[in-house]
């Protein structure tokens, strides 16, 4: 009788509020031992905070749902305010998924974007500006004042991050490389334990992906100093779970990170510079050109572009050295980009003009005069040029694209690459050329050679 009365109260309350009531399905999990009167008393549903701490759920309730689209069947209060049961199914919900109204197999983020959209523009606390209400999503308010700094988080860090990112279900960071180490002086949790805050900066970064702290990203990219792409036995363990040549075989190659090539590569190449887009299939025109080219560019298991589509470590030959596929060093030419891209389209508008709009063709952004901002290239200097130009070795049919030997002393006026190597731009001016020399040379041909080859 007690439970029947509670169900009747629920129906009456739902009708009064205009909300669609939850079906009286069996209770489960932590709700299984409840009686109807524990939640249903008087003319309305009792506050969930009778049992739960208010800080358990960082999502705001009791406010109007603005700038979002609430799916049909998600109940609201009579005034349109959000309720706990807007997102949580109190009857018949899955306790392992916190009673969320998510469909089977739906991820936590997939559930959230039903209302907020994929960009989360109005909800992402990592994009909050100082003074915005979103700061209170993670930080404690006390006496009307928002607290910041250590110890100001509303919840234990992992639980707070788990609300959106579902990190506990993924087993992160336990699902990352078990040999991963960390740099010194990164913030640790109680007892020296890892937390999300250890590796990620919740207030955002502009230099790294996944909000990784700059020092952590540099530490992860230490492979650039200790290069695994070399013909050494120990280097195999950088990418493979074993160094046994018989175990490193297709189709899986015993790769780290569960065989996900893209995740494996970005475990070292963390910064977002120089990455060709991956994870999607070539467009129909690109796929047709690729099929007609006859070039063997391997795609991922679902036909998507992956890092090894364009890059090859030459493990099969025993001469490990990462390079671009179909780059012929003897000719100084590359057939790689032309396999998918129409070079005639790429070269329709020359970037070698005094027009800031063309700068992003080669640079990550429009360079800012007087500063280093925006001057980085979208790829290595060689590949930036080879996307449009395919030329034979010159002059004297010699390979110049390397670090000069001790006998060569480049003039300080000639720009070199990031490793001190000669690049196309060492001899050719890629920008507006006021002198209008042939091939945009930085000096007359004979004088240019003498700037490096001293007699």
Image (tube, helix red, strand yellow):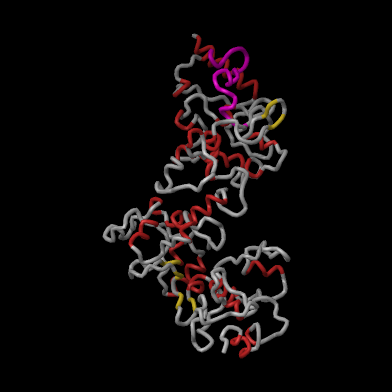
Give left or right: position of 368 versus 212: right
Indicate the quadrant where residue 85 lies: top right
Position of 45 relative to 145 (above/below): above
Q: Work out whether residue 80 or residue 387 is closer to the camera in this orientation and state it.
A: 387
Residue located farthest toward the left when viewing the structure as drawn: 246
- The residue segment tinted magenta is 37-59
Q: Can residue 290 be seen in this snapshot?
A: yes
Position of 77 relative to 397 (above/below): above
Position of 325 relative to 373 (above/below): below
Residue 54 within the segment the image draws in magenta: yes
Q: Work out whether residue 103 or residue 350 is closer to the camera in this orientation and state it.
A: 350
Residue 279 within the segment the image draws in magenta: no
The residue shown at (56%, 78%) is 389
Q: Can residue 108 be seen in this snapshot?
A: no
Percent x, y of residue 452: 58, 83
State how many labels appear.
Answer: 0
The residue shown at (49%, 76%) is 334
Position of 96 relative to 121 (above/below): above
Percent x, y of residue 285: 52, 68
The residue shown at (54%, 19%) is 51
Give left or right: position of 360 versus 183: right
Indicate the quadrant where residue 141 lies: top right
Quadrant for the C terminus in the image: bottom right
Give left or right: position of 211 versus 81: left
Give left or right: position of 388 versus 67: left
Percent x, y of residue 375: 65, 66
Indicate the quadrant where residue 299 lies: bottom left
Percent x, y of residue 294: 41, 74
């Amino acid at each position: 009788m007690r439970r029947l009365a509670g169900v009747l109260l629920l129906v009456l309350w739902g009708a009064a509020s205009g909300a669609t009531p939850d079906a009286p399905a069996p209770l489960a999990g932590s709700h299984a031992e409840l009686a109807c009167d524990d939640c249903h008393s008087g003319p309305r549903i009792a506050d969930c905070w009778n049992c739960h701490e208010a800080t358990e759920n960082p999502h705001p309730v009791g406010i109007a749902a603005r700038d979002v689209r609430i799916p049909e069947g998600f109940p609201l209060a009579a005034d349109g305010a959000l309720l706990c049961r807007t997102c949580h199914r109190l009857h018949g919900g899955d306790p392992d998924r916190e009673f969320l109204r998510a469909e089977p197999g739906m991820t936590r983020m997939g559930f959230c974007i039903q209302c907020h959209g994929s960009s989360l523009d109005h909800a992402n606390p990592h994009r909050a500006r100082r003074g915005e209400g979103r700061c209170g999503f993670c930080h404690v308010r006390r006496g009307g004042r928002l607290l910041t700094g250590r110890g100001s988080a509303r919840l234990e860090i992992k639980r707070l991050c788990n609300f959106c990112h579902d990190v506990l279900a993924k087993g992160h960071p336990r699902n990352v490389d078990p040999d991963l180490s960390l740099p010194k002086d990164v913030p640790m949790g109680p007892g020296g334990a890892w937390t999300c805050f250890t590796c990620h900066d919740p207030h955002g970064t502009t230099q790294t992906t996944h909000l990784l702290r700059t020092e952590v990203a540099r530490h992860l990219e230490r492979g650039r100093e200790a290069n695994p792409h070399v013909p050494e036995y120990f280097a195999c363990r950088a990418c493979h779970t074993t160094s046994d040549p018989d175990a490193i075989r297709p189709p899986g190659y015993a790769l780290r990170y569960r065989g996900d090539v893209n995740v494996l590569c970005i475990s070292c190449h963390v910064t977002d510079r120089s990455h060709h887009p991956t994870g999607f299939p070539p467009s129909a025109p690109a796929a047709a050109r690729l099929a007609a080219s006859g070039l063997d560019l391997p795609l991922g298991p679902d036909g998507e572009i992956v890092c090894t589509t364009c890059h090859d470590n030459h493990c099969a030959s025993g001469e490990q050295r990462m390079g671009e596929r179909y780059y012929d060093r003897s000719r100084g030419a590359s057939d790689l980009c032309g396999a998918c891209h129409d070079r005639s389209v790429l070269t329709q508008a020359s970037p070698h003009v005094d027009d800031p709009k063309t700068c992003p063709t080669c640079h990550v952004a429009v360079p800012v005069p007087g500063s280093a901002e925006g001057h980085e290239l979208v790829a290595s200097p060689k590949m930036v040029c080879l996307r449009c130009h395919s030329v034979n070795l010159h002059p004297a049919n010699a390979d110049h694209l390397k670090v000069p030997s001790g006998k060569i002393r480049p003039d300080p006026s000639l720009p070199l690459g990031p490793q001190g190597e000669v690049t196309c731009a060492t001899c050719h001016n890629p920008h507006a050329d006021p002198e209008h020399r042939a091939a945009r040379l930085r000096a007359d041909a004979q004088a240019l050679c003498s700037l490096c080859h001293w007699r």
